[in-house]
Amino acid sequence: EPEVTQTPSHQVTQMGQEVILRCVPISNHLYFYWYRQILGQKVEFLVSFYNNEISEKSEIFDDQFSVERPDGSNFTLKIRSTKLEDSAMYFCASSDRDSNEKLFFGSGTQLSVL
Amino acid sequence: TQLLEQSPQFLSIQEGENLTVYCNSSSVFSSLQWYRQEPGEGPVLLVTVVTGGEVKKLKRLTFQFGDARKDSSLHITAAQTGDTGLYLCAGHQAGTALIFGKGTTLSVSS
């Protein structure tokens, strides 16, 4: 079965550093998402992306965050200047149709900001 | 703010028992989804319910969407140790992103 792949699985960085989390969505999917899950808390929506632009973003997704689809296969989340509170599991997801359709999630990148 | 409240937060039962977990909101959702998440993995979709009052069965799992489309339940019959995991409900309101509840952590022991 096709799957969403995320790299790296773990990322450790110093506070203030930039990180880029990478995702390869399922090849025929058109909608892409980033979610995060702080340890012990719920899965939180960050941003959705369609047709090479952001379609929706949450309050969490401030100016420190950006997303990009640099080529036909990758979908990246960049955090410009990481803060301690950015430590979380970051999940990428993709779907082939909007709204009610099935989201396929990757296994996540565990980001630790020291 | 849209909120999905899940209960109970933790549930520990013996193999063979039945259980029900709940997902409630004060808001109406166009659909509700149930996911299961294993440690270190992303959520995996179990089912989507769309119509008020809808009941869907997936082997020993029965999912129900409330008539008013504000709540949902997941019932597991004769739980097995393999059912252990985090069960998440998630909902869409029209045109908005999927939001998640905090989840119910289920532990089934033999």
Image (cartoon, rainbow, N blue to C red):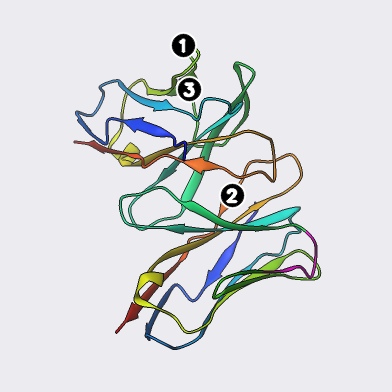
Which is nearer the N-term, disc 3 or disc 1?
Answer: 3
Whether labels 1 and 2 belong to a single chain: the reply is no
Which residue range is magenta in the image?
Answer: B51-56
Q: Quadrant of residue A8?
A: top left
Q: Which residue is mark 1?
A: A70
Check whether the beta carbons of the residues at disc 3 and disc 2 lie within 8 A of each other.
no
Q: Is residue A2 left or right of residue A53?
A: left
Name the residue rendered at 45%, 88% in the picture. B17
Q: Secondary structure at mark 3?
A: loop
Check whether the beta carbons of the residues at disc 1 and disc 2 lie within 8 A of each other.
no
Rendering coords of residue A37 (x, y %): 40, 47
Q: Which residue is mark 3?
A: A63
Name the residue rendered at 35%, 79% in the picture. B108
Q: Which mark is residue B99?
A: 2
Q: Residues within 10 Å of mark 3 (few under 14, many from 20)?
A: few
Identify which amino acid the numbered label 1 is placed on.
Pro
Q: Mark 3, mark 1: which one is toward the viewer?
A: 1
Could you tell me which chain the residue with mark 1 belongs to?
Answer: A
Magenta segment includes A67: no
Q: Secondary structure at mark 1?
A: loop
Identify which amino acid the numbered label 3 is placed on.
Asp
